Image (tube, rainbow, N blue to C red):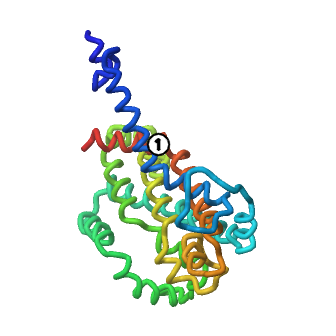
Amino acid sequence: MSKNLDTALGLGAQNRWWLRATTVLVCVLVVLTFAGPLVAILVGAFDANRDPSRLSLVPTDVTLDNWRAALNRDVLHYLGNSLFVVGVGLLLQMGVSVLAAYALARKKFRGAGVVLVLILATMMLPEEILAIPLAVVLSDLPLLHLNLTDSLAGMIVPIVAWGFAILVMTEFMKEVPKELEEAARLDGAGELRVFWSVVLPTVTPALGVIGVFGFTMIWDQYLLPLLVASDAKTYTLPLALSSLRADPEVGIGVVLVASTLAMVPSILAFLGFQRSFMRGISAGAIKG
């Protein structure tokens, strides 16, 4: 086989050095385009420069003053609020999604198609349309008559059920062979045992998919905390970033510190779910 077929573009050939150079140049440009702003934020968090128009990829005056000022502005408190909301909210969301998908995918009942259409319809409405009804409901929770405004619980309850996660899990559970479920029932397994030991282990890649997307959705929430929180003590990090930017006494360095702290959990979440996420995406592509 020709050396030109070593790679898709024939870059393994010795006489194609210019292709290698072009590839390296393109890769560098792509990295700078996507990673450049992130590096600039990280560098700016440790730079004494207070001019937002002079951000660079190389620090000129390294300092920790930005971090001290950020700590004095309770940035870690806002980070803790965000971590609590995303931690509790994501666990509840994944639990509800898995149970709802099991009922929709493995059980036959009248109106299942209508339920799926209603779940899909919830994804069609923009958040801005739901803002006022959501604020009214959270101020007086039906049946319980609880006021969840100005509390972290008010930011968790609306995200417990997410149509996208339910639909993804439903499609994956539909692909589980019925023979596995029937064999488990013949062995005397009950409903909970079948769900926990047979169905759930076969859809673990889907858990990675809804885990990554669910974390991102909850972590990036801005409108919901804006509706719920009136006291700065209940601010999440995205909402605090907005208030820090609007404060004329806060330098750009403090804002970049908060932005850096906002990036780190998302990166760690992706790395944690990376294997299951990639397996889930690949399985979905093969089924599609």
In the image, 49 versus 229, the foreground residue is: 49
Can you say which quadrant of the picture contains the C terminus?
Answer: top left
Residue at image position (73%, 68%) is: 71
* Residue that badge 1 annotates: 276
Q: Is residue 259 left or right of residue 111?
A: right
Quarter of the view holding residue 117:
bottom left
Secondary element under disc 1, as helix, strand or loop, is helix
**Mark 1 packing: few (<14 Cα in 10 Å), some, or many (20+)?**
many
Can you say which quadrant of the picture contains the N terminus?
Answer: top left
Residue at image position (43%, 67%) is: 161
Residue at image position (57%, 82%) is: 229
Give residue 131's position: percent from left, percent from top.
41, 83
Give residue 265's position: percent from left, percent from top.
58, 56
Give residue 235's position: percent from left, percent from top.
61, 77
Quick check: can you spot residue 185?
A: no
In the image, 265 versus 173, the foreground residue is: 265
Q: Is residue 254 above or below residue 147?
A: above
Report the amino acid beneath label 1. Ser
